[in-house]
Image (cartoon, rainbow, N blue to C red):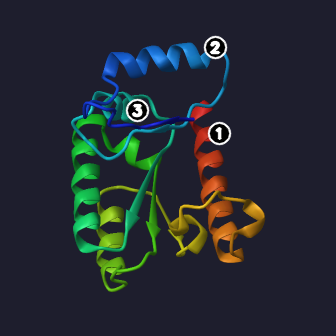
Amino acid sequence: IVAGNNGAHGSSLGYDDAHAAAQILSQHREILIADTGNNRLAGSWHWATIHADVLLVPVPLRRDAAAAAHRMLLDLTATAGRAMMARTIVVITDGPGDAPMVEIDAVDAFLDAGVHSVARMPFEPLFASGERIATSKLRRSTTEALTVVAATVIDLIAHAAD
């Protein structure tokens, strides 16, 4: 797992850096999970979206976040094609300050953009606390939602290998 980072000087991995890191890591690992953040201008984001077998897009239930995610998916469709949307999972996340009335319009927009999988992640106090995450302390609804997301990712990876 390689996490995205803005770095000390506000820069992130460039496209070539992300490619080089992936080449090295692929010699030692079969699966690479990249957290690129949500900067569509970052080279690492471009590399990851081009090479991803699965793209997972978390979206809080806020109109601004849903609109930004929708624009990103439309841009991605324009550059990578609708096939990428078939390998994209949008995960609607619950959190403090979210607006549940946004969900229906947001999900419809994601499906209209060509996304095939939309999952739901309930609010998890442990995630919000900033504490170390122990799976035994997660709420049952969180474990169930994560299981659905993981199964969907595995299914998409398996189909990408075919």
Residue 13 location, x and y as percent? 35, 26
- Viewer-nearest residue: 17 or 53: 17
**Residue 162 in view (yes/no):** no
Is there CB contact under 8 Å for labels 2 and 1? no
Q: CA distance from mark 3 to mark 1?
A: 18 Å
What label sits on residue 74 in the rendered view? none
Where does label 2 land, which residue?
27
Q: Which residue is mark 1?
A: 158
Q: Quadrant of residue 55?
A: top left
Q: Secondary structure at mark 1?
A: helix
The picture places residue 31, in percent across and down from the top left corner, at: 62, 31
What is the spatial separation of the Cα atoms under label 2 and label 1, in whole angstroms? 20 Å
Query: Viewer-nearest of labels 3 and 1?
Result: 3
Q: For this view, does 162 lie left or right of residue 99?
A: right
Identify the residue at horizontal 31%, vertical 23% (top origin): 14
Image quarter of the C terminus: top right
**Between discs 2 and 3, the one toward the N terminus:** 2
